[in-house]
Image (cartoon, rainbow, N blue to C red):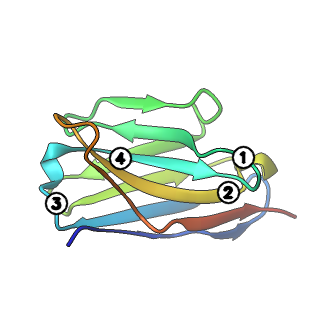
Amino acid sequence: QVQLVESGGGLVQPGGSLRLSCAASGIIFTAYTMGWYRQAPGKQRELVATITVGGLINSADSVKGRFAISRDNAKNTVDLQVNSLKPEDTAVYYCNARHAAVGRLQYWGQGTQVTVSS
């Protein structure tokens, strides 16, 4: 059974930071590109950042310089360090695992809420 379990979300003031973590089980972690996506109320789910098993990173322009994705292939985890948060970063953040060779094979976590508000 595949599980992607996110943690680390919460309420933070503008300019603050959080560290989101995703623990994967039930998959061969090194066969998957891992990523974080987010969905704000009334909007479509959008890419935040992805990281391949080799460490190649792709990230949205809106988060470059503020967010950093990393993975630990020994612990089967992928983290997202989010800094300099803005109210427009408020969303549910989802962990994603997409098979590197079979792209249509992918899994999602249940999501973790990040709210940026004063």
Quadrant of the image for the C terminus? bottom right
Q: Quadrant of residue 76?
A: bottom left
Q: Position of residue 59 (x, y in %)?
A: 49, 32
Q: Secondary structure at mark 2?
A: strand
Q: Mark 4: which secondary structure?
A: strand
Q: In the image, what residue type sits under mark 3?
A: Ile
Question: Can residue 17 be seen here?
Answer: no
Image location of residue 46, percent across then percent down: 58, 41
Q: Earlier in the sequence, mark 4 or mark 3?
A: 3
Q: Which amino acid is tagged 1?
A: Lys
Apparent side of residue 26 relative to residue 70 in the rendered image (left or right): left
- Give the residue pinned by disc 1: 43
Question: Which residue was labeled with disc 2?
Answer: 91
Sequence-wise, which precedes: disc 1 or disc 2?
A: 1
**Relative to residue 54, is residue 2 depicted above or below?**
below
- Image quarter where the N terminus lies is bottom left
Which amino acid, mark 4?
Ser
Q: What is the C-alpha distance between the residues marked 4 and 3?
A: 18 Å
- The reply to whether the C-beta atoms of the residues labelled 1 and 2 are less than 8 Å apart is yes
> Marks 4 and 2, how far apart in space?
20 Å
Dot 4 and dot 1 residues touching (CB under 8 Å): no
Which residue is at a point 42% across and 29% down the rendered structure image? 58
Which residue, given by chain and number where applicable, does mark 3 sit on? 27
Across and down, in percent, residue 106 comes to 30, 49
**Residue 93 vs residue 36: left or right?**
right
Q: Circles 3 and 1: CB distance less than 8 Å?
A: no
Q: Nearer the viewer, mark 3 or mark 1?
A: 1
In this rendering, the label closer to the viewer, 4 or 2: 2
Please tell me the numbered disc located at residue 70.
Answer: 4
